[in-house]
Amino acid sequence: MTKVYLRKKIAPRIANGHSWIYGNEVERIDGEPVGGEIVEVFYGDGKRCGRGYINPKSQILVRLLTRKNEDIDDAFFHRRISEAWAYRQKLGYTENCRLVFGEADQLPALIIDKFNDYFVIQTLSLGMDCWKPAIVAALESLFHPRGIYERNDVPVRELEGLPQQKGFLTAPFDTQVPIVENGVKFIVDVENGQKTGYFLDQQDNRRAIRHIVKNAEVLGVFTYTGTFEIHAGYYGAKSVLGLDISASAVEHANRHAALNGLENICRFEALNAFDVLKQWAKEGKKYDVVMLDPPAFTKSRENIQKALTGYKEINLRGMQLIRNGGFLVSSSCTNLVSPDQFIQTIEQAAKDARKKIRQVTFQQQSADHPIIWGMENTNYLKFLIAEVSDR
């Protein structure tokens, strides 16, 4: 087995639990590593660190799979996926959940989402992609699924020298998968929807709006397929308007409204949020609740300030449309923006909008997406409900 030795000054970060080892953290490699193979990793003093897979073409040279002296084989993946499932069962995430959340489940670069009896997987690194047959076999053994679909049509795979691809990993099935979340019905498009077809990380946060939307006039912005908005209608909103720039997303959202018998309460329009919110504020439009669930705005550290400017702008416009004593519901889904930065951005937006805000709740992603301290990529979602009042 190829042996990788770390630099002494870098070792503490790895020793504290991080699974990523960058090329510039390695002192030497004994052997000729082949991309995707399992390697043994040692600290600079020769003590064992663990085992992981290597990719000389990637900036992340090694991703650790285990700190133990154990074989990495099909049984290893079966065991890890079984452990991930046991964790979700303990917390009550059984019907629809993120079954495997990469590094947080000690399976770096692997995502598995469970929608009833259907599974969607992403193998986002060369080393994990090599074990795709073992992963599929483990799912078939543990769950006897009705279908497994691969959503590896993501640009990050190209950084690993992998092609983008998607398709069935079992016999073909209807990729419009029905689910029920918090009593609300949705259709997950596992073939063409964003990411794996549905944002499971907000499932607990969608339930958190149930009291503030009752009998309220609600505006939802960046609705995608309308999950927050349909929840608002289900929880008793007087009226709900959802906006998204994507016509296909709006069509899907209106379908969800009809599916839940809420087509007379919830309606969706394809509009550019930045344009219309500014105009509506000038016109004096008001809502009891404004919900903002924008995209990440940035995927690189170089553009964080630009992203923060975007978050501030959209939250400022949202606050201007809220009646005195109404509520702002706001999210940020990038780990590059810290919780403190997010809160500060909301504060700045409130100041510029001449509004007072009072925090109702501040949450993260649902617990089927566990957070590992020290691994920033596992701690990414910020979700705020705040009361907004005039100064």
Image (cartoon, rainbow, N blue to C red):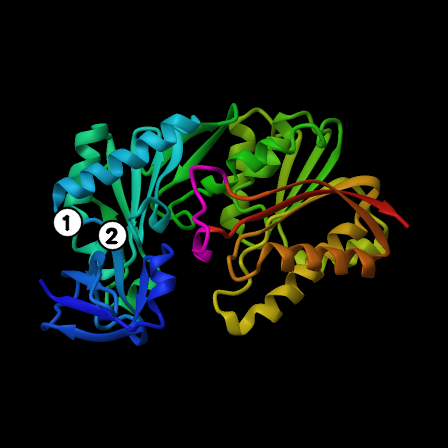
Q: For the residue marked with disc 2, what is the amino acid?
A: Leu
Q: Quadrant of residue 329?
A: top right
Of the 4 image quadrants, the one containing the N terminus is: bottom left
Q: How many marks?
A: 2
Q: Secondary structure at mark 1?
A: loop
- Mark drawn on residue 72: 1
Q: Is residue 170 visible?
A: no
Question: What's the distance in space between the residues labelled 1 and 2, CA to CA?
Answer: 8 Å
Work out whether 108 lies above or below 117: below
Please tell me which residue is depicted at 27% across the width and 59% down the height of the picture.
Answer: 63
Relative placement, left or right, of 262 versus 298 is: right
Q: Position of residue 259 (x, y in %)?
A: 51, 28
Majority secondary structure of magenta residues: loop
Q: Report if the CB atoms under discs 1 and 2 are less than 8 Å apart.
A: yes
345 left or right, relative to 354 = left
Q: Earlier in the sequence, mark 1 or mark 2?
A: 2
In this picture, which residue range is highlighted in magenta?
366-378
Mark 1 neighbour class, 10 Å CA radius: few under 14, some 14 to 19, many 20 or more = some
- Name the one closer to the observer, 43 or 216: 43
Percent position of residue 368, x then y: 42, 37
Image position of 163 (left or right of 193): left
Residue at label 2? 65
